[in-house]
Amino acid sequence: MFFISKFIVLIPAYQPDQKLERLIQILKKEKLDIIVVNDGSGVECQHTFDAISSDCTVLSHEINRGKGCALKTGYQYIQSHYEDDYIVVTMDCDGQHTMEDAKKLYEYNRNHLNTLVLGSRKLDQNVPFRSKIGNSITRGVFSLATGVPVYDTQTGLRSFSNVLMDKMISIPGERYEYEIQVLLQCAADSIPIHEIEIKTIYIDNNSSSHFHPIRDSFKIYREIFHFSLASIVCFFLDIGLYFLLLHWIFSVFANVISGIIGFVTFTIWKRKWNVFSATKIAISTGILFCFVQWLSISSGWAKILTELLYLLILYVLKRFLSKK
């Protein structure tokens, strides 16, 4: 097969079995560049890496450092050994991803270089319960926190071009929480996230997965909470200052001043300018004025209704933009 952009497959591997060997045999037929990161699997798995070493590049961690670290080790290797114009497709080592689906991501990505592409599994009745419920909860929490709809937040089949390589390396995270951090940072920076439906393959009820339901889920939700914390704090700061200022000045001016302070706080906290927070003052002040002057709603209730309406508008707008 002829690829216009260099097609690189990156596989993080921790304690793999023969399924990794079979996957490498399938991939090598496509004449791709294959990179496998041995994330401290131990001597008992060395025979697996020895068996595939002639067909791919094997990088190794002396100890287990986590999936996030393994991915970034692979990214750093790619960045230092390849010229521009390449697509990286990440695959898991447990046989749950197919070459056909990897090609789908690659084909879309090479025509949308500034997009993160996800292989989205249809989580139907054949999916193990812990995977289905975990992904469903994370999907809802992620959507509420970012306004960006992502159906399969935990998929390991992802692709991106060299355009996003610096971004992927700079995103914090060492273990499974790194993958949710990638989605959060892309959502925050308005980097498009596109999902392509792929086959849903679970082998032995996903028994080979090293995902710890409690420990790793806690880390994932902690990252989402940290991502939302600045918005939560600034939301209550805005409302608190507004009610305090109402004792001295008219409601519209109180909203402008509290909004400016909230915007400055948010910008300093996030260390970057955000178009939505910058426009909030004008939009919320206009809504507040309508509530107070036209509908004769008291200043306190008008502020609360204004904030709720603005959050609804922002949520709908972000979902709309994410689909474009």
Image (spheres, helix red, strand yellow):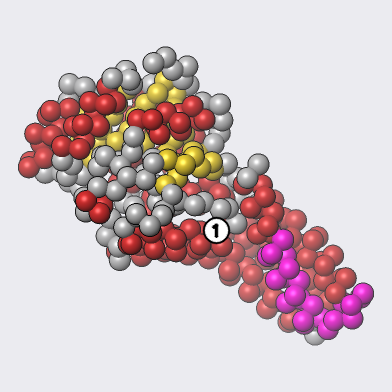
At x 13% / y 34%, what residue is drawn? 48
Give the quarter of the figure containing the C terminus: top right
Give the quarter of the figure containing the N terminus: top left
Side (left or right) of 82 relative to 314: left
Q: Is residue 298 magenta?
A: yes
At x 42% / y 47%, what residue is drawn? 121
Q: Residue 55 in the image: state x and y as whole percent.
A: 21, 22
Side (left or right) of 244 relative to 120: right
Side (left or right) of 220 relative to 22: right
154 or 274: which is nearer to us? 154
Side (left or right) of 65 relative to 170: left
Q: Residue 139 in the image: state x and y as whole percent.
A: 48, 58
Boundaries of the magenta span = 292-313
Question: Can you tell which quarter of the image residue 16 is in?
Answer: top left
At x 92% / y 74%, what residue is drawn? 294
Q: Residue furthest right?
A: 294
Q: Amino acid at mark 1?
A: Ser
What residue is shown with label 1?
Answer: 143
Q: Is residue 62 magenta?
A: no
